[in-house]
């Protein structure tokens, strides 16, 4: 036990020192991470209010932030005399959201060395802490446990082979949690098998977030003009493996529909590559002008960030990207609008995708032929499309309410 713990701490200390020396040589994300790590404590000194107790939320990246956000907003309302410190691990989350959160202080989480954990917790001195999903750091947990600070996990996910169950010193760090708010029975059972009983199945708070967005959705005039009362396929967060089967279908399909493609990477090289493959009339979002007749185009490429979730509102069918990779992108966002969802085959890590496939609202495809088959069926059969849309909507609405359960529990602990 002590050997593995020592090796973990040595590896992180070496990583931290390598980052300081070589951080500028590994691309923009690593550079942002290095600079952000260096600025953590100066930022905290600027934004912390000495007279207000701190509630600390930690998230890994954008997805976990969206899960934490409904709870963060509810906590801010419930504990108005407290200040919120929000930490990110990933540059892709921090750099996008650093100025757009309910938190008073937003920083990178210092690398999980014992010295950093002690210094960070000394500095913010939190009275309550929330981690999200499975971004867990043992030295921070040990330090919080030592100080008997209440720690909670939001939208937790565990399986029997979870990395924290493999080593006793990691399992020991989970004792820092006062309560686990988990997504499903599998997670609860996995924790119970390790001797934990302080668990509630509350579901995934991400459903609360996407429902909230759907309720507030502002209309997107350019999407309305582009759709022009025709059927619309929205392909969200696509990767080259998705575009490899989507573009040939768009080029050759005989059905009357339009397509919005929102690539995961929106750099010019990637977007121009898609445009070159398309045989239909296409336009990039950034090329739209006031006088542009969008109704005359067949394909719109959304080469920008932040508009995709609102675009789903106009979709008749949605394709979600990276199902041929390691992790599909968010399916809750389109589900709340009630729309059939198509994605690649790799959905096993995502409960909501597995559930929706069983229910029939989500269809997985393995190649161009299977994509063509299901899209042709959905365009031709309005009843089938409506039935699958209703299934996704019902499932999404049924899963709303995790935040309320968490807040109710916390209120009862006061």
Image (cartoon, helix red, strand yellow):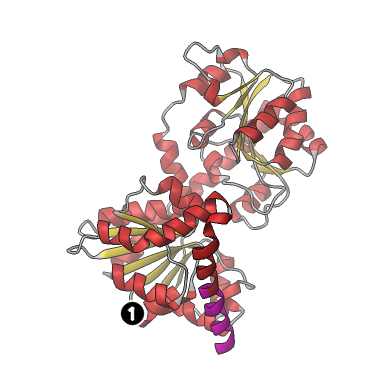
**378 or 93: nearer the eye?**
93
For residue 4: magenta? Answer: yes
Report the side of 188 relative to 81 (left or right): right
Residue drawn 30% across the image and 63% down it: 55
Would you say the magenta stretch is mainly helix, strand or loop?
helix
Q: Give the vertical position of 207 relative to 14 (above or below).
A: above
Q: Residue at x 41, y 61 (%)?
A: 38
Relative vertical location of residue 332 with respect to residue 278 in this rendering, above or below: below
Residue matched to label 1: 148
Relative placement, left or right, of 62 versus 349 is: left
Residue sticking out furthest to the right: 369
Q: Position of residue 269 (x, y in %)?
A: 65, 34
Q: Secondary structure at mark 1?
A: loop
Looking at this rendering, what residue extends furthest in the bottom direction?
2
Picture quarter with the N terminus: bottom right
Q: Please give left or right for residue 35 compared with residue 370 in the image.
A: left
Q: Residue at x 41, y 71 (%)?
A: 179
Residue 262 location, x and y as percent?
Answer: 59, 34
Is residue 92 at all visible to an observer of this figure? yes
Part of the protein shown in magenta:
1-13
Q: Residue at x 68, y 32 (%)?
A: 384
Q: Is residue 393 above or below residue 403?
A: above
Farthest left residue?
Answer: 51
* Coordinates of residue 8 in the picture (x, y in percent): 56, 78
Q: Is residue 66 visible?
A: no
């Amino acid at each position: 036990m002590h050997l593995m713990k020592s090796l973990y701490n040595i590896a992180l200390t070496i990583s931290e020192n390598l980052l300081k020396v070589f951080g500028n040589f590994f691309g923009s994300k690593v550079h942002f991470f290095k600079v952000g790590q260096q600025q953590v404590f100066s930022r905290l000194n600027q934004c912390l209010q000495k007279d207000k107790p701190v509630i600390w939320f930690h998230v890994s990246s954008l997805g976990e932030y969206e899960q934490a956000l409904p709870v963060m907003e509810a906590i801010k309302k419930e504990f108005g005399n407290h200040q919120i410190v929000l930490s990110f691990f990933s540059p892709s989350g921090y750099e996008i959201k650093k100025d757009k959160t309910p938190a008073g202080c937003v920083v990178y989480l210092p690398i999980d060395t014992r010295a950093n954990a002690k210094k960070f917790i000394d500095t913010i001195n939190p009275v309550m802490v929330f981690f999200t999903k499975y971004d867990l750091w043992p030295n921070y947990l040990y330090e919080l446990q030592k100080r008997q600070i209440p720690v909670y996990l939001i939208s937790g996910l565990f399986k029997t082979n979870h990395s924290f169950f493999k080593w006793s010193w990691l399992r020991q760090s989970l004792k820092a949690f006062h309560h686990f708010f988990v997504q499903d029975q599998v997670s609860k059972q996995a924790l119970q098998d390790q001797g934990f009983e302080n668990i509630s199945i509350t579901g995934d708070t991400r459903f609360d977030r996407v429902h909230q967005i759907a309720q507030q959705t502002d209309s997107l005039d350019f999407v309305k003009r582009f759709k022009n009362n025709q059927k619309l396929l929205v392909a969200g967060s696509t990767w080259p493996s998705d575009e490899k089967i989507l573009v040939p279908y768009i080029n050759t399909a005989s059905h009357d529909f339009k397509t919005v493609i929102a690539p995961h990477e929106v750099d010019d090289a990637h977007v121009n590559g898609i445009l070159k493959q398309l045989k239909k009339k296409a336009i990039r979002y950034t090329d739209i002008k006031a006088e542009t007749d969008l109704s005359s185009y067949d394909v719109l490429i959304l080469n920008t960030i932040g508009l995709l979730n609102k675009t789903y509102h106009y979709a008749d069918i949605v394709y979600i990207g990276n199902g041929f990779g390691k992790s599909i992108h968010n399916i809750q966002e389109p589900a709340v609008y009630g729309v059939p969802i198509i994605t690649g085959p790799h959905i096993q890590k995502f409960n909501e995708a597995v559930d929706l496939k069983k229910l029939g609202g989500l269809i997985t495809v393995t190649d161009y032929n299977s994509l063509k088959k299901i899209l042709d069926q959905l365009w031709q059969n309005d009843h089938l499309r409506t039935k699958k849309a209703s299934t996704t909507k019902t499932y999404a609405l049924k899963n709303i309410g995790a935040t309320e359960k968490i807040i109710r529990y916390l209120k009862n602990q006061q």
